[in-house]
Amino acid sequence: MRPLPRASDALIDHLRCQILTRELPLGFQLPPEAELIELYGASRAALRDALRQLEIEGLLLMRRGRNGGAIVRYPDLTAISRSLASVFTIREVPVGDYVAFSRLIEPEVAAQAAKNATPEQRENLTKLAELRTQPLGRLDAVSPSFHAELARSSGNGIYSTLLESLQPVLEGELRVRVFDEGHDERTRADHVQIAQAIQEGDAGGARRYMDAHVLKLENFLNDHGMMSDPVVPPEAWTRLLR
Ligand SMILES: [Zn+2]
């Protein structure tokens, strides 16, 4: 015997579909509760269940108070980043896995950016390359990141979505542990060189410089015996509480 679907499930699917097809546009405020109950023939409990679920999915913003209500929003990647970080902690994913992934993907992303970046993105990459980096100390603190902007500039929606979700977790978390003045300076010099190649539309150069950049990180982590450390150690979560 299959369990009956919850009354709220159909309503969740219906509302989610309306938001994702933009039938309910971004910023649209849903009618008050009594009207929604009438409109959808749902119970108050089912309606509240549905709204709560869509809030968790990042598709609705619940504003409390007298003029409050549910407003259509689009999900950002913060929730995904945090979920990924939890999975990495529980599965004890080592730093070496991150490095292997970066060596495979980052040079290709840099080459694609040299081909596809808009003039504004090329400018922005040059600016970000010259910025000083800081140890973040928080898993979800998104700094203006050279690597995230690079992924956006690749013109590939999978690269950009994936790397933007991973970047705050991996780069941010790792930066806490590898940060020192010399490392910061070398990173900046590498980024400037990569940004320069992208400005010039030099895909081969961008790929080569990025490969060398990620290789330096690999060597650094190897030299410091960090390759088998967990990429998001349990301590990272307690650091959030401080
Ligand atoms: Zn870098």
Image: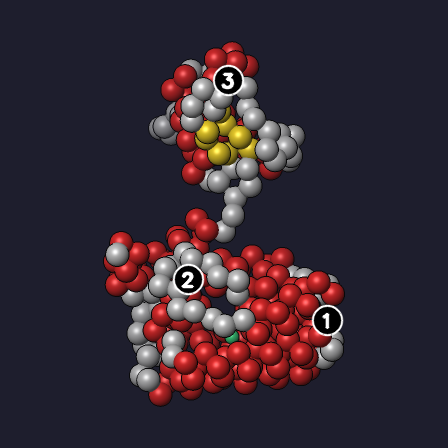
Q: Residues within 10 Å of mark 3 (few under 14, many from 20)?
A: few
Q: Is there a contact, CB below 8 Å, between mark 2 and mark 1?
A: no
Instruction: From the image, tell me which residue sits under label 3.
Output: 32
Instruction: From the image, tell me which residue sits under label 1.
Output: 115
Instruction: Give whichever of discs 3 and 2 has the lower sequence position.
Output: 3
Where is residue 91? Give x, y as percent: 32, 62
Label 1 near ligand 1 (CB < 8 Å) = no
- Residue at (52% x, 37% y) in the render: 59
State whether residue 13 is above or below residue 106: above
Instruction: Give whichever of discs 3 and 1 has the lower sequence position.
Output: 3
Q: Which quadrant: the C terminus?
A: bottom left
Is 110 placed left or right of 115 in the picture?
left
Q: Nearer the viewer, residue 44 or 131?
A: 131
Which one is closest to the eye, mark 3 or mark 1?
3
Q: Residues within 10 Å of mark 1 (few under 14, many from 20)?
A: some
- Residue at (39% x, 53% y) in the render: 82
Instruction: From the image, tell me which residue sits under label 2.
Output: 169
The secondary structure type at the circle numbered 2 is helix
Amino acid on which disc 3 is placed: Pro
Is 80 placed left or right of 15 in the picture?
left
Instruction: Give whichever of discs 2 and 1 has the lower sequence position.
Output: 1
Where is residue 119? Give x, y as percent: 74, 65
- Residue at (48% x, 81% y) in the render: 185
Where is residue 33? Give x, y as percent: 47, 17
